[in-house]
Structure formats: structure tokens, C-alpha cells
Amino acid sequence: MSRNTTLRVVSLTQSSGVELNAYLVGDSKPTRQEQKLKTLSEYVQQYPSGWKKRLELANLLYEMGHIEQAVEEYRQVIDRQQPLIGVRLQLGKLLQLMGREVEAVAVYESASANARNEATRQHISGSIALCKCDTQAAILAFESAASLEPDNAAHWLALGQVQMGRGDAVAALRAFDTVLSLNPDDVVALIDSYDASQAVGNVRQAQRRLSKVLEVAPGDFRALKRLADTRCRMRLVSGEEGKQTKQIIGSVLQLAPDAADARELLAYYHLFRGESANGVGVLERFTEEHPNHPRGWYSYGRCLFHTGEYQKAAEAMLKAYRLYPQDCEIYRALCEILPAAGMTSSPVPLDPPQPPLKRGELEQAKPSNCTGGTPLKVPLFKGDLGGSNRRLKVPLFKGDLGRSNNQVTLASIVEEMLDRFPERWSVWTTAGRVLVESFQEIERGCGVSAKGTQLEPQLPDAWFSHGRVLALAGKHREAVEALAQGWQLLPEDAGYLQSVSAAVWLGESYRLLGDEVASRKWLEKACQFRELMEFDPAMAGYWQGRALLGLGDVTEAVEAYRSAMSRRLLYPFRGEVEEAVKRLKGKRRKGDHAKA
């Protein structure tokens, strides 16, 4: 892709010609943007009352990334040509993405007042609901719009993206499939469908979607980024395959040299080659260059965590949290990293407040869905799971949470996470696991985790995650029931990566219940998913090792574990495997001595 590669606006249009969704897509066609910008700017200065050329100018500024100036020009266009609903929607979307939700709502409401089409009004209502952080209302509005205009891809795409934002990848896939049935070459829907397929573990469908995107838009930044990530997870990082992977990462970096996720690709490429210091260094330098970039600190924290540097990982992730405490994934990462670093009870000091984010940093920091706005409803006890609508009036944790402007605790992080993201099933299972593992709040933790299955009763991963919490709590009978429920929800026509871990968990719980026949059945099933192993050979070796160990085949289990480590298995799994191999080798030596 050439250096003068630009971003072009791709819009989805409804039957009346109104643009409903706009996205930035890479365009490899050389342009003379600067000259065009100069010409259009001079024209609107000479003829300030016109609106058509000003609209061209606004769109060009948007394409060039001058968002603030584009917003101002869109406002000028609206002042000069009132009924332009499409321009209003474009302006509202920009303001929404910039975090200026109040302004966005005002613009959307003015667009709705001028819309003659009911489906358009419903779509706009969905956008307004998102600005107000009312995900359920947004879903209902987009569903209404889609039912009124079932052949309009814009409604289905918006619906799928909201479903994906709340963690319901299964429902999101259905919506994206509808978009693709209407337009098989829709790049945005293909990429969103890839992400959703990955989220549910359907790696084969995900690869088909990615191949299609690369066929339709071979130079698309998002497609190249996902291709590089896939190749890294497949450990195609050495020899000729490694050279190809490095070239793809180079293309991604050329397109977006200051994007944190582009640097993250390069970091993990080094990690999977066994060059941990180089990988960590890539993201460390990024945080030095962009100290106020929360996504950079998040990536750096994850990378440190995956190399076993738990204390440093916690420090980096807390900096991400301090910079941008509105991102659900930062909270979930802290729930994983703080216990690993032994930081479960004592208050953790935070860095002093940072300067405001720059525009580019803010745009990359924005999460995929809004936060807050919904009262926290939580089952405090095992019996209180039947749809109680009471607000949480007492904390989940006993004692002082230790939260202040200068310090946090793991408990306060969990409380905030549930308060900010109550509609996301994964935060409930995450919180339940923390309660069980770090605070030994067994009944409370299991009750909190169950909320995830109530929010997404048709999502296999919600049941698998809840089943794992129950097993960690020693409730293996209930764990088996939850895991089996998730298994029944898996489609029968495709292999899913989650199948491997779920089968291992079922086998382990059945063994602890004393049912050796059922245990062997599930552990043997876990060893049969070898055709999926190519997509992540390191994790495949880990799960195969656990299954073989449960079956009593110590020699093969050690071999599988060693294979996983040779494929650069990441921490915390690597630490677990290292301990297991050391323990198993010790047992074998003792056995040999006993025979002698």
C-alpha cells in the first residue's frame, strides 16, 4: 500500500437515501488530498453561503482525520441546508465516537424530527439510546428498524454491533449473517463477523470470513491486523512463514505507525519467537512515546502479564485504568492480574492524574460500547436469582473497599466493574471468580457468576465460565450441570475451541464426583479435537496435557506439556505447566527408585 494511502468513508444507505452508518475504510488509490483541501477551502471562503462544496470539504476533512474541523463544517452545512438527515446522522456519529454524547443526542433528535421514515426514526432512537448508555433500549430500537426494513443492512449491522458490544457474540453473528446475505462483500460486516466467530470459538468460520475480506479488500488495515494476529497465534513466526508474518505486520505498522494494537502485533511476534525482551521493549517504548495512551498501557500490561512479570503488569494496567476508567477490558484484566501479583487486599496507590488525552489517543481509548447508566442489580445470595429488581445497597465485599481518589483495591475494582457494565455477562462471571478464588466468598461468588447465564442463557461460553467458577468453588455437581448446559448449546456442525476446555473441565469434575466412566468419556473427547489444534498449538498442547494427565497417561501428558512450552505458551498457563512438569518428573523418579 502506498504512502499516500487514505481513508475513505463507506456508508450504508436505507431505501430513502439516508446514510445511517459510516465507517473509515482503507483506500489504496493515490489522491491529491492536500491540493483538493486547499481548493475546497478557498471555494467555501469565496462562496460562504453554499452548502454542497462545504459538504465535500467536511467529508474530505473526515477522510483526512481532521475530525474537529469536519465536525464544524458539518454544522455549517446543516445551518445552510436544514433537511439533510444524512449529514446530521454523520455528525451525530462523529460526536458519539468522540465521547460528546450530549451533543450527539441533540443532533440525533433534530435528525429524527426531520425523518419521514419510521424505520429511520427507530434507527436514530437506537443511536440515542447508545449515547445514553441504555443498551437494551438500543437493541429494541434496532430490532424494530430491522423488522420494518428487513432488507436494509444498516439496521442489522447496528444491531449486531450492539449485541457484540454487550458480549452476546451468538446474537451478533445472526445479525451479521443477515447483512452478508444482503451484501456478501460488505467489508465491515465480514470483519465484525470474523470477530464474533472468534469470540464463540468457531475458528473455521472466522478464517472463511477473513479470507473473504482479504479477497474483497486486500489492503484493509483491520483485515491485515487480524491476519497477522491469526498467524502469530498459529506460531507462524519462523522460517519462510515467519518472514511472511513479519511483512504483514510491517504493512500494518506502515498504515498506522502510532496505533497501539499495531505495535502489540510486533510485540507478540517477538514473544512467540522466544524474544521476550524485544517484545516487551516494543510496548515499553510505545508507552514512553505516548505516556497518556490508555490502550498502550493496556497492551503493555497484558504483554508483561503474559511473560510472568505480574507486579510490573499490575502497575502498567493500573496506569491504563487511571487514564481511562471506562473500558470494561481494563477492569477484567485487573481482576486477573492483581491476584496473580498478590495484590488482593492492600490498597494500591495510583499515579497522579495525567494531562488530558490528545485527540488521537482519546479516539483509540474509546470502548466499543457505552458504559454506566444502569442501576446495579446483583443477587447477593444463592436464593436471590429470580429476577430481583432491587438496587445494590450493600457492597459485595465485607469491610471498607479502600477506594479513594489515590488508591484502589481489588474489591473496589470489582464493585466499579459491576456498576459500570451490568449488562455484560462476562463481568459477572469474572467477578464471581474473584469472589471465590481471592476472597473465598463461595456462595456469594457463585450467585454473582450465575447472573451471567441469566443475561445470556443461550450463550455457551456464559455457561462454561459459570461452570468453571462452580468447580473452583468445589461445587462439582452444579459445575457439571452448567458445563453440560453450555455443551448442549454448541452448534453441531462445527468444531469450537471452547469445546476442548469444556470437555476437560467436565472430565475433571466428574472424576472428583467419583464417576470415573463419565470422566474418561469427557477427557478422551478432549483429546479428539486435534483438527482444531493448528489454530493455537500452544494452548492445544496445554489442554491435551491436562486431559492426558486426567486419564493417567503421565508420559504423554509431559510430552504434550513440553510441546506447549516449545510453542511459547504464555503465562499464567506456562507457570502452571512448568510446575506440573517438575512435579511429574519428580514422581517418576520416585517411582523408578521404588522399582529399583
Image (cartoon, rainbow, N blue to C red):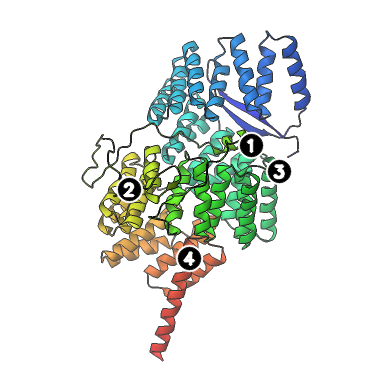
Q: CA distance from mark 3 to mark 4?
A: 35 Å
> Is 205 placed above or below 113 here?
below
Secondary structure under the numbered disc 3 in the rendered image: helix
> Is 100 placed above or below 404 here?
above
Q: CA distance from mark 1 to mark 2?
A: 56 Å
Amino acid type, mark 3: Gln
Q: Which residue in the protein does label 4 denote?
A: 575
Q: First in sequence: mark 3 or mark 4?
A: 3
Q: Which residue in the protein does label 2 denote?
A: 400
Residue 441: % across, % down: 29, 54
For residue 216, the mark is 1
Q: CA distance from mark 4 to mark 1?
A: 42 Å
Quadrant assignment for the C terminus = bottom left
Q: CA distance from mark 1 to mark 3?
A: 20 Å
Mark 3 vs mark 4, foreground winner is: 4
> Is 589 placed above or below 57 here?
below
Mark 1 vs mark 3, foreground winner is: 3
Amino acid type, mark 1: Val
For residue 502, the mark is none
